[in-house]
């Protein structure tokens, strides 16, 4: 007799059959995949196999986040052969009705659980406030001053900002060393370095003091990021909880941390080396009214980071297929940053995302990147892509040639792997390691003569506070535990 159970089983079987049909018809064309780059831009070699990726031009911005296997250079003939082989590949056998029904039921259950989790974790989106000051039509800005392109006179100070937590401090020293080594006028660079605790400030200053000559010390400004500024404003959806590190958000508060800064700021992540004169980044053209210059990433469109079903996002009038950018390297005009209230707008998106699902659930995991994509939409100039060659932290991600890497102005080991780790898994680690500077162990007489100066200032090992000696030793032990090569000695 036909009953409810019979109807449900029939429905599950029908859904399962549709799933099987879909999976046996081959891969979705790249131009139709959600978040994929347009075919004309993304397909350089015409790869057609379901397990292949298009040959990507590293200068086009069409670069993948990572892949399971190292890429192999492919000619047009090789791609055609791969396509032919894929076309001849037999379809997998159809599943039994019982297996199809079970798979469909499991998928429905997973979807229901995910939906329940989203409802429980996030409030329903609130109606858009027509008076919201950060709606594009409501932005009330001071008049734009007459625009004059910034020209390098060879004397103007160059401001560089780098932020770090305890696990990336070794990278900060390498960034500084690479910049000083490749800049024609190193004496005019001021480094604004942000750490997360007093003991990390002391450790950073000690490392800088022992790594660089005395005259350089006046060029280093080390400051502790006030954690309360981002308290209850960070929500990460996904597995990458490292993106919740407060140091990731220090860039939002550049003028709060350093209110006397003027001109521009070149922000550089700690997993970077600079191979050219940083003046080229600092004085890169920025269009009138734009906040800064960023390298676009057309493989990762905005939809990959942002929830375009959210009404407040829709009110931004953004195109979800727009190329994103990686906010790990950029140059910003501080006059425009202040005039357009960037810090407040970035905070607005952070706070909203803690209550409602604005970003982070689309695959990116969230972090400090999506608020910048939201706030800078239509206000970001395209930066020369050689100033941000990225994704070197993903093992086997790219078929970059040694010649291309050598020609890059700046290299970024963003991704899961870092070049200072003892385990293999990154691309071109030897390029980074030439700038690795060992952190000397504390001397036997450390903390024997503590000074009366500020607790976060480093004078000498002997003048350090006893608690800082203990904390530095503990942090060094913790770094060694996770495989950071503090002595810059690598087994491979």
Image (spheres, grey):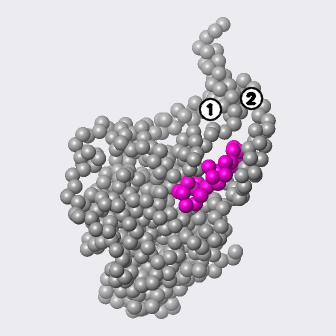
Residue 424 occupies which quadrant of the picture? bottom right
Q: Is residue 71 above or below residue 99?
A: below
The circle on residue 415 is none
Mark 2 element type? loop
Q: Please provide percent x and percent y for residue 120.
A: 43, 39
Q: Is residue 181 visible?
A: yes
Per the model, the C-alpha gap separating discs 2 and 1 is 15 Å
Q: Please provide percent x and percent y for residue 458.
A: 39, 85
Q: Please provide percent x and percent y for residue 196.
A: 40, 69
Q: For this view, does 84 lie left or right of residue 198?
A: right
Q: Is residue 246 visible?
A: no
Question: Is there a contact, CB below 8 Å, between mark 2 and mark 1?
Answer: no
Judge the density around disc 2: few (<14), some (14-19), many (≥20) Cα neighbours within 10 Å: few
Residue numbers of the magenta segment: 43-65
| Residue beneath disc 1 | 106
Q: For this view, does 430 lie left or right of residue 127?
A: right
The circle on residue 95 is 2
Labels 2 and 1: the sequence-earlier one:
2
Depth check: give the residue in front, 44 or 236: 44
């Amino acid at each position: 007799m036909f009953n409810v159970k019979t109807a449900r089983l029939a429905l599950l079987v029908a859904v399962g059959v549709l799933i099987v049909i879909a999976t046996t018809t081959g891969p979705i064309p790249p131009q139709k995949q959600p978040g994929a780059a347009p075919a004309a831009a993304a397909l350089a070699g015409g790869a057609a196999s379901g397990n292949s990726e298009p040959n990507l031009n590293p200068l086009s911005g069409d670069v993948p986040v990572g892949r399971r296997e190292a890429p192999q250079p492919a000619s047009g003939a090789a791609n055609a052969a791969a396509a032919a082989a894929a076309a001849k590949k037999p379809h997998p056998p159809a599943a039994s009705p019982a297996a199809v029904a079970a798979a469909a039921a499991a998928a429905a259950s997973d979807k229901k659980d995910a939906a329940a989790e989203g409802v429980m974790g996030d409030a329903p989106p609130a109606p858009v406030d027509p008076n919201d000051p950060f709606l594009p039509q409501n932005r009330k800005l001071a008049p734009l001053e007459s625009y004059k392109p910034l020209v390098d006179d060879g004397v103007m100070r160059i401001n560089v900002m780098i932020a770090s937590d305890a696990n990336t401090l070794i990278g900060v020293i390498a960034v500084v060393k690479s910049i000083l080594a490749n800049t024609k006028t190193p004496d005019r660079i001021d480094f604004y370095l942000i750490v997360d605790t007093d003991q990390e400030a002391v450790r950073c200053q000690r490392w800088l003091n022992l790594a660089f000559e005395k005259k350089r010390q006046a060029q280093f400004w080390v400051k502790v990021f006030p954690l309360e500024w981002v308290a209850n404003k960070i929500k990460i959806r996904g597995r990458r909880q490292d993106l919740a590190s407060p140091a990731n958000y220090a860039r939002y508060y550049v003028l709060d941390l350093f209110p006397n800064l003027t001109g521009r700021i070149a922000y550089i992540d700690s997993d970077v080396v600079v191979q050219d004169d940083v003046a080229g980044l600092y004085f890169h053209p920025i269009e009138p009214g734009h906040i800064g210059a960023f390298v676009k990433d057309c493989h990762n469109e905005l939809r990959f980071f942002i929830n375009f079903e959210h009404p407040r996002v829709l009110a931004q009038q953004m195109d979800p297929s727009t190329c994103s950018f990686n906010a790990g390297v950029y140059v910003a005009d501080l006059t425009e940053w202040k005039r357009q209230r960037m810090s407040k707008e970035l905070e607005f998106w952070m706070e909203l995302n803690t209550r409602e699902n604005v970003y982070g659930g689309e695959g990116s995991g969230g972090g400090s990147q999506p608020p910048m994509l939201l706030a800078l939409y239509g206000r970001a100039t395209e930066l020369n892509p050689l100033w941000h060659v990225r994704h070197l932290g993903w093992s086997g991600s790219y078929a970059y040639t040694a010649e291309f890497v050598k020609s890059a102005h700046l290299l970024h080991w963003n991704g899961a792997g870092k070049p200072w780790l003892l385990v293999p898994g990154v691309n071109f680690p030897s390029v980074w390691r030439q700038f690795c500077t060992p952190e000397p162990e504390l001397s036997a007489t450390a903390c024997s003569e503590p000074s009366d100066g500020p607790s976060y200032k480093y004078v000498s090992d002997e003048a350090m506070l006893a608690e800082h000696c203990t904390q530095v030793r503990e942090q060094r032990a913790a770094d060694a535990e996770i495989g950071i090569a503090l002595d810059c000695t690598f087994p491979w």
